Amino acid sequence: MKLPLLLAIAALGLCGCASAPKSELAVSDDGVDRERMAIIEERAARSGVRVFWMNPPRKPATPSGG
C-alpha cells in the first residue's frame, strides 16, 4: 500500500518540475545584465571561486524621450 502511494507522489512531483516551457523562461527580459554576469562568473571560476548572486547587476537605464 505504501509503495504505490510513494510512487504516485514521486510521479506528481516530477510532472510539476516539467510544467514550464524552457523557451518561455529563456526569453524573459528582467533587466539583469547577463553578459556581465557571465564575464564575472567565468573569471571567478578560473580563480576557483563560486559566485552566488544576491543582487545581480542590472543593465544601464536608457534615457527615454528627448
Image (cartoon, rainbow, N blue to C red):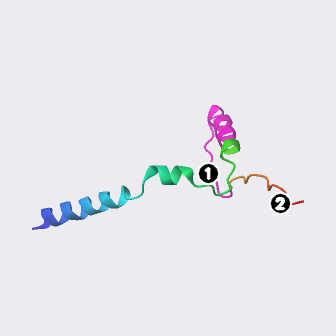
Q: Amino acid at mark 2?
A: Ser
Range of magenta residues? 38-55
Vertical placement of residue 13 versus 27, above or below: below
Q: Amino acid at mark 1?
A: Phe
43 in magenta: yes
Quadrant in the picture for the N terminus: bottom left
Return the x and y of residue 23 as percentages of the image width and height.
48, 49
> Looking at the image, which is closer to me, 11 or 23?
23
Disc 2: CA contacts within 10 A as few (<14), some (14-19) or many (>=20): few
Rendered image quadrant of residue 21:
bottom left
Q: Which mark is residue 52?
A: 1
> Could you tell me which secondary element the residue under label 2 belongs to?
loop
Q: Residue furthest front?
A: 66
> Looking at the image, which is closer to me, 35 or 63?
63
Q: Which mark is residue 1?
A: none
Vertical placement of residue 41 versus 24, above or below: above
- Taking the spot 45% from the left edge, 50% from the top edge, the residue there is 22
- Taking the spot 49% from the left edge, 54% from the top edge, the residue there is 24
> Could you tell me which secondary element the residue under label 1 belongs to?
loop
Return the x and y of residue 45 as percentages of the image width and height.
62, 36
Return the x and y of residue 61 as percentages of the image width and height.
79, 56
Which residue is label 2 attached to? 64
Left or right, residue 51 beside residue 7:
right
